[in-house]
Image: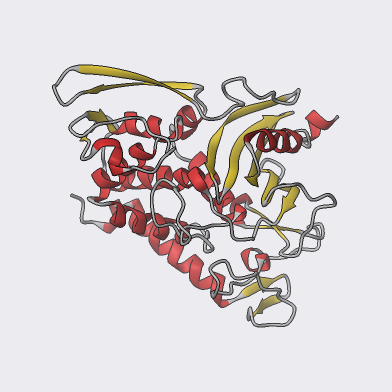
Amino acid sequence: MLTDNKNRPGVWRRAAGALFAMLLFGYTCTAGGCKSPQSDDVPMLAPADGGLVLPSARTYAVQAESIPVGVRFMADGYCVPAADARPEKKRPVKAALLFDITDQEILFTQDCFTKIYPASTTKLLTALTFYRIIEEEGRSLSEQVTIREDNGGITIYGAKLCGFMKGDVVSLEGLLNGLLVYSGNDAAVAIAEYLCGSEADFVKRMNEIAWEIGATHTHFVNPHGLHNSEHYTTAYDMYLIFRECLQQEGFLDIAGKSAAVIDYYGVDGRAKQMELESTNQFLIGKSEVPDGVTVHGGKTGSTTPAGDCLMLFSSCGGREYISAVFGASSRDVLYKQMGELLSLEPSAAD
């Protein structure tokens, strides 16, 4: 194991994250200088957890006269809507956004700083944590994982499961496919237990990473997103998490699949195979993508308290976009609303 911090990117990343968090809470920088976030001209976000009040979106970036009203940008191309931004027409969902990440423009935002339940979009942070640990510890995607319990010990009716049984042996890469393509909750548990020894320790690392990348309104208690009242986030935090996922080598190759074939071994040592279809209706052709738009991948989620949720990475007219819809009342509403958001991408709207 490496002990030289100069050779451990995770150490420096966590240090940078801690510095970012201190700056986030300490000062709001404007073109005229820095002001305390207690200043009257700095709106505060509504508490995401019932008690903690965080500085508004203005904290994230230096303001400049050239930036249009209602739009703020973080360093390195992050988009930040004004805390009081409101859409002209509110959509029948809990939160939504559409960001042009090529030209750094905010095309739509609705309640993106409001507390929401993420359902299985949680698995984006699970995947990001997976990639971080693999990088920091020099692990291989070919490492073999022995499943500890049938279905990861999950007994909740209706929970999405790959169906791994105790004693099955599957690669980390296979588990990652089960996580992102099929949204297998048992795959999430197996990843957490293998990489950190327990779900609890893995989730602790998830929350640390969320903090490091500025997703300070996020608090997760499991790696899969099955409902818990203490498991919450915001649409904007999920944008930050998804954006970071897109920078991980190989992420989109998996998150953009219409189906995945997983080879593994049963407890009896016999080779087995399962084919899992994507939960993303755009990727499997069950929902129509607007003309000119290409959907490259994303993550779905659905529980009764969270509603139906979807995050997408797409492109249109040479530009790239991140879009999100959270809290739709049904799958049909989800894909209708997401389709309308995608239609706002300029070349699609022309």
Q: Position of residue 311 (x, y in %)?
A: 59, 40
Q: How is the image coloured?
A: secondary structure
In the image, taking residue 99 as reference, residue 309 lies left or right, namely: left
Q: Where 84 falls versus 314 (above or below)?
A: below
Residue 99 or residue 307, whichever sits in front: 307
In the image, taking residue 196 as reference, residue 123 lies left or right, namely: right
Q: Where 13 falls versus 177 (above or below)?
A: below
**Image quadrant of residue 302?**
top right
Q: Is residue 6 visible?
A: yes
Residue 99 or residue 273, whichever sits in front: 273
At 52% from the left edge and 59% from the top edge, which residue is drawn?
215
In the image, taking residue 99 as reference, residue 24 lies left or right, namely: left
The quadrant the C terminus occupies is top right
Q: Position of residue 216 (x, y in %)?
A: 52, 63
**Image quadrant of residue 62?**
bottom right
At 54% from the left edge and 71% from the top edge, which residue is drawn?
23
Q: How many marks?
A: 0
